[in-house]
Amino acid sequence: MFKILKYSFFDLVRSRWSYVYLFFYLALGFVLLFLNNDLSKAVITLMNVIIILVPLIGTIFGVMYYYDSKEFTELLLAQPIKRADIFLGQYLGVAISLSLSLLIGLGLPFILYGLFQSTAIWDFVLLLVTGTFLTLIFTALAFNIALYNENKIKGFSYAILLWLFMAVIYDGLFLMSLILLEEYPLDTFSIGATLFNPIDLSRILILLKLDISALLGYTGAVFQKFFGTGLGFSMALSALVLWVVLPLLNIYRKSRKKDF
Amino acid sequence: MERIEDIFKQLSTALRIAFLYKIVFFIACFSITTGWAKTITVCNTCEITSLKKAIAVAEAEDTIFVKEGTYNEFNIIVDKPLTIKGENFPVIDGEDQGEIIRITSDNVTIDGLFIINVGTSYTSDHAAIRVVKSENFLIQNVVLEKLFFGIYLEKSNNGKVYHNKIIGDAQDEYNSGNGIQLWYCKNVVVNRNIVQKTRDGIYLEFSDNITIDNNISTENLRYGLHFMFSNDDVYTNNTFENNGAGVAVMFSKRIKMLNNTFHKNWGTAAFGLLLKEINDAEISGNTFEENTVGINIEGSNRITYTRNNFIRNGYAVKVLGACYTNVFKHNNFLYNSFDVSYNSRINDNVFVNNYWSSYTGYDLDRDGIGDIPYRPVKLFSYIVNRTPETIILMRSLFIDIIDFSEKVSPVFTPDNLVDENPQMKKIE
Amino acid sequence: MIHIENLYKSFGKNKVLEGIDLSISEKGIFAILGPNGSGKTTLIKSILGMVIPDNGTISINGNSIKNKWNYRNEIDYLPQIANFPANLTVQELIKMIKDLRNLRGEDQQLIDLFKLSPFLNKKLSNLSGGTKQKVNLLLTLMFDSPLIILDEPTTGLDPIALLHLKKLILQEKAKGKTILITSHIMSFVEEMADQIVFLLEGKVYFKGDITALLTQTDEPNFEHAIANLLTKQNV
């Protein structure tokens, strides 16, 4: 698997797209810092941007890479290599190169801007952690979509739909159901509902850091326990890990059965 | 040569004589003073071993000097103008029997005592030190622990509570008392005290012209500082941290609140500052940091808010009910989850020249003022007021979208609530 | 060597293999022929484990290949469409395949033979179809496995390269290997193949050498014999 990972990674490191993303993040970091002139403010703006953008890039890039490397995959399939290793290796290649683009692209401007002397450093670390998680998750979901759809156009459409659903539609439905059911106790429901959307989970991690004062203003005992103790943080983090592991298991399962 | 030596000798003798006269004069003066007011020493091995006895034998203006040691006494009544001074913090242990010291005379000073074990009662408010209908009192350098009420001023004026340390262990509101309480008092200065873990750190009821400054009030169950029906008071440079709520000002007029710090007052219905039925107050130069609600305003009018910093609060300012002609000017609103929240569509308050960290406008003419107005009330805050659980959707793209649409055409939030001149740079 | 029993595979409603029974135990060159869509590539991919059969068993050297991958160490495979990772150079690709198989590989000889040295440092995306096919052949034939599977090996080759290819195949045969070839160039098949396996409607319709084929179809030459088989399909 590590050999595949190595080759996919080197393949990607040389691809134009990796640089496009790297420069995109670099530009984003510098522009935000330049406009805000304030590290903490830039970090907060970035958090809002990251939880939307990273999933989009992850899904699109994941699907694209899968379809683009189809012949390469077939070449590998005829070699004496375990099937799951091929896909997991390719997945890791994409996920790691995307994560690196994110880490370097955002890390560089912020470090140059004096991140290590700033109090916002932990916010920034959290930002990178959630960004990396989202990359891992959405790339894995993208591979799943691609594995199930031979048709490239279909695959791309599903990928965009997935993103749209997770980033916007899900929360719209969520909000509507909360308002419609407002006479019932909702805190367990609302915490439960976030677990099914990795973007919401990342949002929760960020809320715990930035908006804890507001979150603690609510009376529900479940909310108080979830946000007031380490419970919320550890639950959100473990749910994110599950969100990485489950799609990966499915890649493993599906790749064993698929014909090429 | 010899003649010169002689001259020197004579000179020095003259100086010596003059010096001696001076010493004699001082001793004379000193004996006259002690003749008027004597010092009584209390210690475990002295002739007088209790504070009560010392007070009994003392005359007005005497000083009672309490040496290091433990004195198990309560219901000590100071009924003449005395100075009671402790050396190395002698312990006055009330053994949970009730009130410990009661001052009923003018001109009493209590200094440097360590008072513990005030009796808890459900019927009377036992205090470590109670001042009743007296003037010109001074309570300083006192340490209070294991208390019910700490320092209780009752219908007493023109006194000073200075540099005391009050450390309670309050668990529940119903069986705990306040650190420093003023009831029907006037012209009292409460200065440089530390109050912790009581019910209300400092409580004022029907007390006017009180100055409260440089106190640190933390971890109190209810409020760090609490005003009821008190007017024309000033509090400055105090720190309120980790209290049930920082400061509550209720049914009071003309209160000045300057340069205080309200920090980490977290929790359900917790706020840095609660204003309820307050008129004509001035709130300036304060810092509200990481509170669930920075300022919670209910039915308060004609208040000016200037040069305050609202940093990382859940809500910087939450306005409930009818509040008229309040002015927010030159404040910094930095990284709050919500800057301003209203529960109605009506607005009669002015927000102008503030700095808002979430302002995204531009300043093309470079005059330091944003070219497009800022709308501090988000639709989402309205939704959260209605269905609190929706708070979990904060920072969601969907919420940003509906907030944006509300910004473009306000339907649920007051449409005249805008800062027409948002500052581009933080106000220093 | 290869033993296939009762192999079924369909893609959706399209039944491709319908009970293939095939046993290849001898050395030599086997041509797998059949009309378009008769399942040649599917059969080859099944042997390689790229297509998972619905039913039936494939065993190589007596061991079932189901859920295995190690047996592919014994196979050199030339895929039909040679598309490679675009960002790699020829040199890197060769290195990579060697690395993946953990084998040294006799690449230098083949590089010289196909005159590939000027292309070694070029990216694969910049190569012409014929050159790509040469690289493809190089990648397959540089190893020394007992079973070689070539799917349309002649595609895009110039006459000289074709001659080299034929020579190479015969060399490998001489080493005592089993070689499976699919091709639609009948002259090539006639020249090279020891045995013909003809697939029709998802089954093995004919297996045997060219003489047997001619006898069975009663045709004067190979091309006609194949045409005969193809027209039978239409009957």
Image: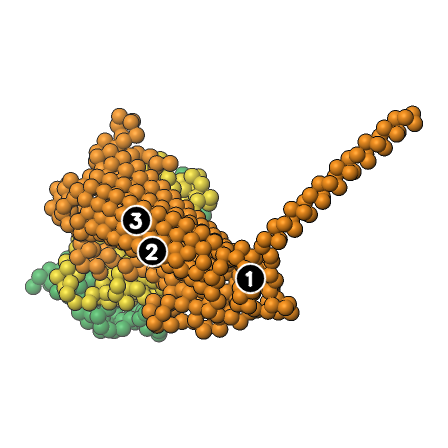
Residue B121 visible to an observer of this rendering: yes
Q: Nearer the viewer, residue C35 or B394?
A: B394
Which shade is chain A?
A: yellow
Q: Which residue is mark 3?
A: B231
**Amino acid type shown at disc 1:** Ala
Other-residue count near label 3 (Cα within 10 Å), few / some / many at <14 / 14–19 / ≥20: many
Helix or strand or loop: what does disc 3 sit on?
loop
Labels 2, 1: front one: 1
Residue B51 visible to an observer of this rendering: no
Q: Residue furthest right?
A: B2
Chain letter of disc 2 in the image: B
Q: Which mark is residue B58?
A: 1
Helix or strand or loop: what does disc 2 sit on?
loop
**Amino acid type shown at disc 3:** Asn
Q: Nearer the viewer, residue C137 or B275?
A: B275
Place of residue C72 in the rendered image (x, y in percent of width and height, measured from the top left): 36, 64
Measuring 39% from the left and 52% from the top, which residue is drawn there?
Answer: B157
Q: Do pointers 3 and 1 mark residues of a single chain?
A: yes
User: Quadrant of the rendered structure where residue C6 is?
Assistant: bottom left
**B22 relative to A123, above or below:** above
Total numbered circles: 3
- Ranked by sequence position, the earlier of labels 3 and 2 is 2
Q: Which residue is mark 2?
A: B184
- In the image, the chain rendered in orange is B
Place of residue A191 in the rendered image (x, y in percent of width and height, measured from the top left): 25, 64
Marks 2 and 1, how far apart in space?
Answer: 30 Å
**C139 relative to A82, above or below:** above
Place of residue C196 in the rendered image (x, y in percent of width and height, measured from the top left): 25, 63
Which shade is chain C?
A: green
Other-residue count near label 2 (Cα within 10 Å), few / some / many at <14 / 14–19 / ≥20: some
